[in-house]
Image (tube, rainbow, N blue to C red):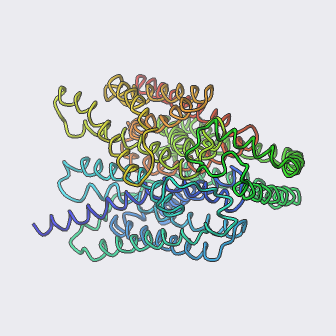
């Protein structure tokens, strides 16, 4: 009984680890929007938060594989899964501490401070990489092996809950508890009312929880260590491919990052800062102007048409200031065009630097399987690209959504008004994962069909309730119930078959993104939000198809797939830079191509297994 109690305590602690992953990952979406205004960043630069965080997953998994290859023993097995989780939690706590120090005294526009913020998130992500490598198999050890999948499902559900709550909590910490209050972010930052000091409180709490969780694991002596003497299977050629990929990513990103330290870029920043100061002064004058039509009305109470009307009125009241802004914008555009084209070129090369080595490896491994390890299997290599694309599109849809919702066609929303929609996006993933887990409990066909209709709306109700309790307006989210109905139809059509389910949800994803691209307002908004619903079930489908038939290389193949969480680091910045060039709305074409590849992957694997 005592042993079971200890295991239950550890399972509870383990689920909090899964919660951390979701909470931080989803909370980053709100944080990057704040950083964009605080540090005067363009859309690409704000996406470097995702680059640092998800890039750490790749680097962490790569380092484990490299050290294991050198020592010819699985480092994680030698440590033990329990210690692997402890080391990961401690490393993430160091990242939280680094974040606290990074934001201490950080002033608006201080690019060096932003660099430290990225470094801190990278350390947190490295810790998460260790935790994720160890936590999934460790959950299988905490009790009856036959119920291992149930424990993983529980942990996954808690992870999704973290992604739903993250944007809400981060928003409340940054902007306060009065969710309906009108906030002009740039103006509040300029006045010194909003600083990164608030982030310290968040990471003090998170860092403390990391340490508390690691202590609970460390002092629970009766827990299994998770050590194994299983043989480490090397893959020299696969390792070489991954190293080449890593070097190419560094080489292609270097000129992009260096371009932000040129004289032309400094001129752009100077003109941009001048425009920001002018806009803030104009807004202050407008609010104190007794003749202003909307000066005394909170922004959150205005309709979209009124907000546009307000912008036009401000321009008419202050023509001289806006003439200066237009002249500055013209100079900015002239300076930016050659820089942006150069950056986009290198970012596209970076994308090819990831995909091309994998495709070349797939070609050569078919001729000679020696030293290729799991990468000798085409479904695994194509699956690595699929995971790369899937994580990329999942992160990119929501991380660029903040900038999208600030456009006139999407409501000119404030940062606080955006938070419930970000929460709803991640809530869509929770809805799908809760629904997809029904089969784990082996209900009868009749009960299963009923649950597949009821469970999604229960999860939907949870998301609405969390936002309502937090003081956010939720009536605008009711329309999402129609999107949930479409997802339910997809589950029935997929019939629990990974290939069919992935293909169907891929098609739904393409259609949703196209509708979003060719429309505006709430139709486009909910089309993009539904991307979370359609992404929700893709990870297990891709994973299952990718490792099918790998035999003794299954574990190694799983490690390679985890590395490709790298997609969350590469694709969002690529879309961000495209947004800087052609516009944030039009940049969502990137998401269409991602979903198209996932459809192709489903078809390719179907043919591969038919031949075998």
Q: Is residue 312 above or below residue 137?
A: above
Residue sitting at the far left: 1
Residue 180 x, y percent position in the rendering: 50, 52
Up-down: is 453 above or below 116? above
Specify the quadrant that holds the N terminus. Answer: bottom left
Residue drawn at point x = 49 percent, y = 72 percent: 201
Q: Position of residue 258 (x, y in %)?
A: 79, 59
User: Who's the residue at 62% across and 48% down the image?
Assistant: 570
> Is any atom of residue 102 visible in this view?
yes
Could you say where residue 499 lies in the image, as x and y percent from the top left? Answer: 40, 28
Horizontally, is 223 left or right of 70 in the view? Answer: left
* Residue 585 picture quarter: top right
Label count reads 0
Residue 580, quarter of the rendered image: top right
Rendered residue at 30%/73% (across/down):
216
Q: Is residue 487 left or right of residue 115?
A: left
Q: Is residue 70 above or below residue 179?
A: below
Residue lying farthest to the front in this orientation: 290
Closer to the camera, 518 or 101? 518
Question: What is the quadrant of the C terminus in the image?
Answer: top left
Q: Position of residue 16 (x, y in %)?
A: 34, 61
Q: Nearer the viewer, residue 591 or 383?
A: 591
Foreground of the two, 512 or 87: 512
């Amino acid at each position: 009984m005592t042993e079971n109690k200890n295991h239950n305590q550890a399972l509870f602690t383990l689920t909090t680890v899964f919660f951390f992953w979701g909470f931080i990952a989803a909370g980053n979406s709100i944080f990057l929007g704040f950083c964009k205004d605080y540090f005067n960043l363009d859309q690409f630069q704000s996406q470097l938060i995702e680059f640092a965080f998800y890039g750490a997953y790749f680097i962490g998994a790569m380092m484990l594989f490299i050290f294991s290859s050198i020592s010819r023993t699985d480092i994680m097995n030698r440590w033990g899964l329990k210690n692997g989780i402890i080391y990961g939690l401690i490393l993430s706590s160091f990242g939280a501490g680094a974040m606290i120090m990074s934001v201490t005294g950080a002033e608006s526009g201080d690019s060096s401070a932003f660099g430290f913020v990225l470094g801190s998130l990278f350390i947190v992500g490295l810790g998460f990489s260790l935790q994720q490598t160890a936590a999934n198999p460790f959950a299988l050890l905490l009790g009856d092996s036959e119920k291992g999948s149930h424990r993983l499902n529980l942990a996954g559900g808690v992870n999704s809950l973290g992604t739903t709550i993250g944007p809400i909590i981060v928003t409340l910490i940054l902007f306060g508890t009065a969710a309906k209050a009108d906030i002009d972010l740039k103006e509040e930052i300029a006045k010194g009312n909003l600083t990164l000091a608030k982030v310290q409180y968040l990471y003090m709490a998170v860092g403390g929880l990391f340490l508390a969780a690691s202590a609970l694991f460390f002092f629970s002596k009766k827990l299994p260590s998770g050590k194994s003497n299983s043989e480490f299977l090397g893959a020299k050629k696969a390792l070489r491919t991954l190293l080449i990929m890593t070097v190419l990513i560094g080489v292609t990103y270097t000129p992009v990052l260096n371009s932000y330290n040129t004289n032309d870029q400094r001129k752009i920043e100077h003109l941009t800062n001048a425009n920001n100061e002018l806009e803030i002064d104009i807004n202050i004058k407008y609010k104190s102007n007794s003749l202003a039509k909307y000066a005394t009305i909170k922004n959150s109470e205005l309709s979209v048409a009124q907000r546009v009307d307000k912008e036009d009125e401000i321009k008419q009241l202050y023509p001289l200031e806006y003439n200066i802004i237009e002249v500055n914008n013209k100079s900015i555009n002239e300076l930016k065009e050659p820089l942006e084209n150069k950056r986009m070129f290198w970012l596209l090369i970076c994308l090819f630097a990831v995909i091309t080595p994998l495709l070349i490896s797939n070609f050569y491994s078919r001729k000679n399987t020696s030293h290729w390890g799991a990468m000798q299997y085409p479904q695994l290599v194509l699956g690595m690209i699929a995971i790369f694309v899937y994580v990329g599109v999942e992160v990119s849809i929501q991380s660029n959504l903040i900038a999208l919702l600030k456009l006139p066609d999407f409501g000119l929303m404030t940062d606080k008004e955006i938070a419930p929609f970000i929460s709803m996006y991640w809530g869509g993933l929770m809805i799908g994962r809760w629904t997809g887990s029904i089969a784990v409990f082996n209900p009868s066909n009749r009960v299963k069909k009923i649950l597949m209709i009821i469970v999604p709306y229960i999860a939907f109700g949870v998301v609405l309730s969390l936002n309502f309790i937090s003081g956010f307006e939720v009536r605008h989210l009711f329309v999402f119930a129609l999107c949930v109905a479409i997802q339910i139809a997809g589950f029935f059509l997929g019939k629990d078959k990974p290939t069919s389910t992935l293909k169907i949800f891929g098609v739904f994803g393409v259609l949703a993104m196209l509708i979003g691209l060719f429309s505006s307002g709430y139709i486009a908004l909910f089309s993009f939000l539904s991307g979370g619903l359609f992404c929700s079930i893709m990870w297990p489908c891709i994973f299952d198809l990718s490792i099918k038939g790998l035999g003794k290389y299954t574990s190694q193949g799983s490690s390679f797939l985890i590395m490709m969480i790298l997609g969350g680091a590469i694709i969002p910045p690529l879309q961000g830079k495209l947004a800087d060039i052609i516009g944030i709305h039009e940049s969502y074409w990137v998401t269409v191509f991602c979903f198209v590849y996932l459809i192709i992957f489903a078809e390719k694997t179907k043919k591969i297994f038919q031949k075998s």
